[in-house]
Image: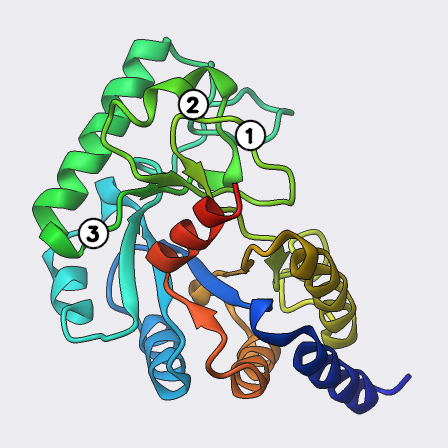
Amino acid sequence: MSLEAKWHSLVEQIACAGPRTRFWLRDDDAVAPTPALDQLLNVTEHHHVPVALAIIPALTGQPLVTRIEDSRMACPVIHGWAHCNHAPDGSKKQELGLHRPLPVVVRELAAARQRMSDLFGGRLLTMLVPPWNRIAPEFLPHLGQLGFRALSTFGSAAPTASVTVVNTQLDIMNWRGNRGCRDHGELIDALSGLIHQHDRLGTPIGVLTHHLVHDDAAWDFLRRLFRLTEGRWLSAADAIVAVEAER
């Protein structure tokens, strides 16, 4: 099937699925104003797509606060503490693992929430996005006590936590290959499968992006996807509510 035929088939599938097919967008690794961030904010504003901007607390500051304060679509969420890998060489990268004493990491998470609250005030959504989408199960019972509203990692399987888990399921980047956008046909096939799955579950599909490393193909895919799915995008806060409603 040609790429255009796949796009056409996707549009038909979404139309047949009805109003239960909804999406939400999470973009990771924001720190400061950049041309790439401008592009993300411009394209999401143009297509009225809310974006949960996962910001690294230890590395950000007032310039980013100022840049997004007039954005109607961007919502700041908490991307770990410093996006620093503490796993040994040869292991998968992880900031929120048991490579350090549990109380140390818990204090770091508390500091992350406090710093983001100080910077963004009431605009902050206290959703924790673990760096590299990894968090040790031992930390999950502490999240509610630390003031987090939700947890967002990657994949269809949601861990049991003291907060609502709202995962992403479609990462548009090819991290193991050329580190550019995945093949558009491959992304459409994956999205089609997710639509079939989530139409039964009633929960929104999470799309994951990383604006700082997008190539032209990534921006092209997002523009077309946003154009074909306008009106079906939830904010991160509404995605939390949608997940809770299906429990």
Q: Position of residue 219 (x, y in %)?
A: 53, 79
- Quadrant for residue 13, please give it: bottom right
Q: Is residue 217 above or below residue 106?
A: below
Residue designated by label 2 = 140
Q: Name the secondary structure under disc 3.
A: loop
- The type of residue carrying mark 3 is Leu
Residue at the (58%, 67%) spot, across then down: 20
Quadrant holding the N terminus: bottom right
Q: Is residue 197 left or right of residue 227?
A: right
Residue designated by label 3 = 124
Q: Name the secondary structure under disc 1.
A: loop
Q: Is residue 203 left or right of residue 122?
A: right
The earlier-in-sequence mark between 2 and 1 is: 2
Residue at the (38%, 32%) spot, across then down: 163
- The type of residue carrying mark 2 is Leu
Q: Are marks 1 and 3 in contact (CB under 8 Å)?
A: no
Q: Residues within 10 Å of mark 3 (few under 14, many from 20)?
A: some
Q: Name the secondary structure under disc 2.
A: helix
**How far separated are the C-alphas under marks 2 and 1?**
8 Å
Number of marks: 3
Query: According to the image, what is the colour scheme of the structure?
Result: rainbow
12 or 99, nearer to the observer: 12
The earlier-in-sequence mark between 1 and 3 is: 3
Q: Are marks 2 and 1 in contact (CB under 8 Å)?
A: yes
Residue designated by label 1 = 159
- The type of residue carrying mark 1 is Pro
Residue at the (71%, 79%) spot, across then down: 16
Q: Residues within 10 Å of mark 2 (few under 14, many from 20)?
A: some
